[in-house]
Amino acid sequence: METRRITVLSAGLGVPSSSRLLADQLADGATRKLSAAGYAVTVDVVELRDLAVDVANNFVTGYAGPRLAEVIAGVEASDGIIAVSPVFSASYSGLFKSFIDVLDPKSLDGKAVLLAATGGTDRHQMVLDYAMRPLFSYLRARVAATAVFAGPQDWGNTDDGGTPLSDRIERAAGEFVHLLDGVQPGSKQPSLESQPFEQLLAGITAGN
């Protein structure tokens, strides 16, 4: 059974955090769909607020401490990323962007990514297509077509005016899983066994 490794990046600052809640629901949806497709799944959840000091030190020293280095290695080894940020001043949080900045720019090349954001008003939902998507497109990630925004009205409410949050999560998770299905970019293909010309010729002759 093939395994798909997902790293969840939650940039929420509070405890509890709506960003973490949304991240968990997206991860659960993706895990369920991957399992149904026959994959084993491992999920690593990273609370970026716990790495805030390490990220700042990385900018100053140019060196990632052991805890941050471990998280960076996990991101690089992942098949897919679920990235969730709260919205501040009409964009992703500074902590979220700072973590992305300490990654090797090539580490997300070809990686499947599902984007999501939380905010205090629906006016912030444009951050997904005008800030987060361009960032990950620049890093050459493969971003799921549907991104998910959750506002205050989405929590504890089954209807947000026609499309429940759960429906948006299911759709986005399905598109994310589609990106994770099959051979992944950058994965090594089985090498073809080379044979002497005489052996190949003998096989062709035998077939005739």
Image (cartoon, helix red, strand yellow):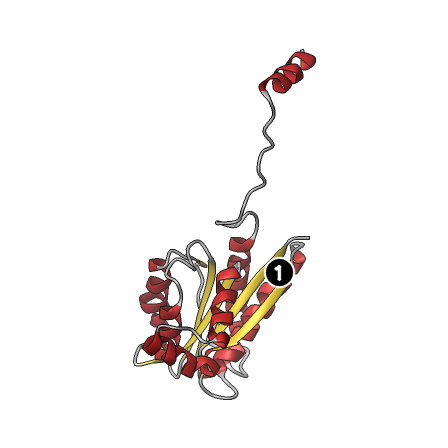
In the image, residue 207 sits, relative to residue 33, either above or below, namely: above
* Front-lying residue, 156 or 87: 87
Secondary structure beneath disc 1?
Answer: helix
Q: In which quarter of the image is the C terminus?
A: top right
Q: Residue at x 49, y 75 (%)?
A: 66
Q: Name the residue under label 1.
A: 33
Judging depth in this view, the residue of 79 and 14 nearest the camera is 79
Residue at 69% of width from left, 53% of height from top?
1
**Callout 1 amino acid:** Lys
Where, by quadrant of the figure, is residue 121 drawn?
Answer: bottom left
Residue 172 appears at what percent x and percent y? 50, 63
Q: Can residue 90 be seen in this view?
A: yes
Number of callouts:
1
Residue at 44% over, 70% down:
116
* Quadrant of res 36: bottom right
* Residue 16 in the image: above or below residue 80: below
Q: How crowded is mark 1: few (under 14 residues within 10 Å), some or many (20 or more)?
A: some
The spot of residue 35 in percent (x, y) is 66, 60
Q: Quadrant of residue 130?
A: bottom left
**Residue 123 appears in the figure:** no
**Horizontally, is 136 left or right of 76 in the view?**
left
Q: Residue 87: x and y, percent?
A: 37, 79
User: Where does residue 207 sit, x and y in percent of width and height?
Assistant: 68, 15
Q: Which of 88 and 106 is in front in this view?
A: 106
